[in-house]
Structure formats: C-alpha cells, structure tokens
Amino acid sequence: MFEGLFQPMHLLVIFVIALLIFGPKRLPELGKGLGDGIRSFKDSMKDPDTKSEVKSEVKPEVKPEVKPENKPENKA
C-alpha cells in the first residue's frame, strides 16, 4: 500500500505545498518543532523510566478567600 509513497517527486510536491501554505519564514520553525518532537519521542521510547526534562511553567491558579459578610439575621 505504501510502497512508492516517498519517491523524490512526491516529497518535492509535499514540500512545495507546505511552502505555499506556511511560507518560507515559518517552515524552519515547523521543521525544528517536528524534529524536537520526534527526538523526545525516541528518547522516551528508549528509556521509559526517566522523567521528561521539559518542565511545565503553568502556575496554579490562586483563588482569593471569600469572607462571608457580617449581615444581621432577620428575627421576626
């Protein structure tokens, strides 16, 4: 099914389409991101016991304390 999929002419057509869609300035960034993703995937497959070196910089949301207002109760 995928025997002749990655022939040079096919790869050239894919590259031209990507160049038209993303533009010449954005392609190197996309290639670097794709390479980094594949590299980290391969590293995680080699040694699944190690933790990823990428640290999340998402800070937990801190909610302010809500103090109840001092309202007199209605006594009828």
Image (spheres, rainbow, N blue to C red):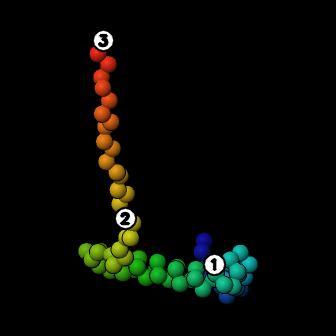
Query: Is 56 displayed left or right of 50 in the figure?
Result: right
* Residue name at image x 52 percent, y 80 percent: 33
Q: Nearer the viewer, mark 3 or mark 1?
A: 3
Task: Name the amino acid type tagged 2.
Answer: Lys
Give how far across and how far down residue 16 sits, in percent: 72, 82
The foreground one among 69 and 9 is: 69
Report, in whole angstroms, how far the alpha carbon at label 2 lies from the one at label 1.
45 Å
The foreground one among 10 and 43 is: 43
Give how far across and how far down residue 66 sits, in percent: 33, 44
**Pointer 1: what residue?**
5
**Pointer 3: what residue?**
76
Report, in whole angstroms, how far the alpha carbon at label 3 lies from the one at label 1.
84 Å
Q: Earlier in the sequence, mark 3 or mark 1?
A: 1
Quadrant containing the C terminus in the rendered view: top left
Q: Earlier in the sequence, mark 2 or mark 1?
A: 1
Task: Report the disc number at residue 59.
Answer: 2
